[in-house]
Image (spheres, rainbow, N blue to C red):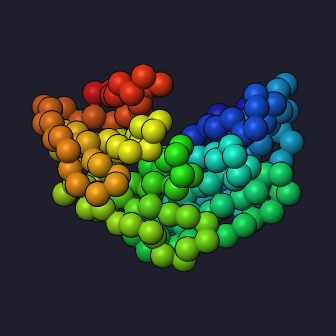
Amino acid sequence: LATNSDYIYDIKFAMNESMLCCAQREAVYVYNTKCVETHVLKRSMLLPLALEYLPYHFLLCSIGFQGKLVYFDISMGKKITTHNTKLGQCDMITKNPRNAIIHCGHNNGTVTLWTPTNEQPVARVLCHKSRIRGLAVTNNGWEMATSDDRGYLKIWDLRTYKELHSFKTTTMISNLSYSQKGLLACSV
């Protein structure tokens, strides 16, 4: 896939297992099932750090060093839109499976919620006082979990944007993920 000097920041399957999208150092590279490079999205998705795929819309989303959220339609092979978050570098992105809203976790502790049709975020939630390290949304789309540098884990209600629970650990929690049963997994 990548040479020794390449970094892979994030990987997502698009459509099915036949399309593997890799956020590498300077662009998004697309590989087939035999790990042969089929596309390079240099002009469309420059300097990506994180990827997310919206399967019902065939949209590949990326955000990176420049803090620009890019929506790319993989069925047509065209960039749909680019939103400047104006919050600097961002490496946390996830989707709400219920309504396909993209959630971006930023270095200032803010989570912004985006749609492709709005130039501004549909919501901004100040979740933490330090950098967002983990971000996950439940499968029903009603709750969001966030974690930060200082060891805080918070659960948020996405209908009212209010904090439901807050937990403090002695170490930083970096990765969050909800299971199909609604259980939250995290890494410390």
Q: Is residue 108 above or below residue 18?
A: below
Q: Is residue 66 above or below residue 107?
A: below
Q: Residue 52 at x, y = what percent?
A: 59, 46
The answer to which of 42 and 13 lies nearer the viewer is: 13
Q: Residue 153 at x, y = what percent?
A: 22, 39
Q: Residue 118 at x, y = what percent?
A: 55, 74
Q: Which quadrant of the rendered structure holds the N terminus?
A: top right
Q: Which quadrant of the rendered structure holds the C terminus?
A: top left
Quick check: 187 left or right of 30? left
The answer to which of 57 and 175 lies nearer the viewer is: 57
The answer to which of 55 and 2 lies nearer the viewer is: 55
Report the number of discs.
0
Residue 107 visible somewhere in the drawing: no
Quick check: 15 left or right of 61? right
Quick check: 19 left or right of 185? right
Residue 128 visible somewhere in the drawing: yes
Q: Residue at x 13, y 31 (%)?
A: 170
Quick check: 179 left or right of 169? right
Q: Residue 126 at x, y = what percent?
A: 26, 61
Q: Residue at x 71, y 52 (%)?
A: 57
Q: Residue at x 54, y 52 (%)?
A: 99
Q: Quadrant of residue 68?
A: bottom right
The answer to which of 8 and 152 lies nearer the viewer is: 152
Q: Quadrant of residue 172?
A: top left
Outermost residue to the bottom: 119
Q: Residue at x 35, y 52 (%)?
A: 158
